[in-house]
């Protein structure tokens, strides 16, 4: 039976937002430390400093919590791509901001959570759907950004060619998640520089 929260439904929006974020932060910590299956709602509620009823008030289950975490990451990427396409020099902006993306992917705390979500997606069809839908949106936005850069340089690429470039770019960044786990001592600055060079070369390739 689903547990419901007994607190008033008139909670103001800022407080509700803060509570949701409190839960997401606690859940992320529990997922990193115990894995998706090992992290119980009881553990999340203890980490968040609130009752299990409060957890269920905001999230139906752990899959819903993962959906919210994935949605936050997606929102950040959508904001980034919008900022890139609004830049005077989209290509230069993409290459410059790539260093931030490398740092984020190489952060061991972020990496542990993202790898755990990916692992659960491989086992859980519901989580797989959440991850794949977010990925589809990411690919569309990255495709639009790359197409704008290529078009500005005089290239007319097919959707397939743009899609291939998106997959290469995504593979570069997603591969960093495993590298920071397997080789935590890697030189992040040098890796970021090499990634920037690789992106620059990718954008110059024939369509």
Image (cartoon, rainbow, N blue to C red):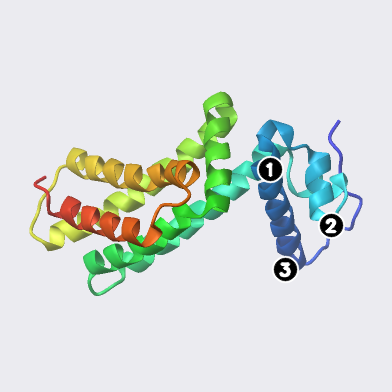
User: Can you say whether 65 is above or below 98 in the image?
Assistant: above
Alpha carbon distance from label 3 to label 2: 13 Å
Which of the two discs, 2 and 1, labels the residue nearer the N terminus? 2
Closest to the observer, 17 or 189: 189
Q: Which residue is the site of mark 2?
A: 9
Q: Is 59 on the left or on the right of 46, as rendered?
A: left
- Residue visible at 46% across and 36% down? 132
Q: Which residue is the site of mark 3?
A: 14
Alpha carbon distance from label 2 to label 1: 33 Å
Query: Badge 1: few (under 14), some or many (20 or more) residues near its Cα, within 10 Å?
Result: some
Closest to the observer, 63 or 199: 199
Q: Are marks 3 and 1 in contact (CB under 8 Å)?
A: no
Q: Quadrant of the C terminus?
A: top left
Q: Are marks 2 and 1 in contact (CB under 8 Å)?
A: no
User: Can you say whether 146 is above or below 32 in the image?
Assistant: below
Query: Badge 3: few (under 14), some or many (20 or more) residues near its Cα, within 10 Å?
Result: few
- Residue visible at 33% across and 55% down? 191
Task: Select label 3 or label 2 by which is in front.
Answer: 3
Alpha carbon distance from label 3 to label 1: 29 Å
Coordinates of residue 21 in the picture (x, y in percent): 69, 58
Q: Is 42 on the left or on the right of 25, as rendered?
A: right
**Secondary structure under badge 2?**
loop
Q: Any mark on residue 33, and which?
A: 1
């Amino acid at each position: 039976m689903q547990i419901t929260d007994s607190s008033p439904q008139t909670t103001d929006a800022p407080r509700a937002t803060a509570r949701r974020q409190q839960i997401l932060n606690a859940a992320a910590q529990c997922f990193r430390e115990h894995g998706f299956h090992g992290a119980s709602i009881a553990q999340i509620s203890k980490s968040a400093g609130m009752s299990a009823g409060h957890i269920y008030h905001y999230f139906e289950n752990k899959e819903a919590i993962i959906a919210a975490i994935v949605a936050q990451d997606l929102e950040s990427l959508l904001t980034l791509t919008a900022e890139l396409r609004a830049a005077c020099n989209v290509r230069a902006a993409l290459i410059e901001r790539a260093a931030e993306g490398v740092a984020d992917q190489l952060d061991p705390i972020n990496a542990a959570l993202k790898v755990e979500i990916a692992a659960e997606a491989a086992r859980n069809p519901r989580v797989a759907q959440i991850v794949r839908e977010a990925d589809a949106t990411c690919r569309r936005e990255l495709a639009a950004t790359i197409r704008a850069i290529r078009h500005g340089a005089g290239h007319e690429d097919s959707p397939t060619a743009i899609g291939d470039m998106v997959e290469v770019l995504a593979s570069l960044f997603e591969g960093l998640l495993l590298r920071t786990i397997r080789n935590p001592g890697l030189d992040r600055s040098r890796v970021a520089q090499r990634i920037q060079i690789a992106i620059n070369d990718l954008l110059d390739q024939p369509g």
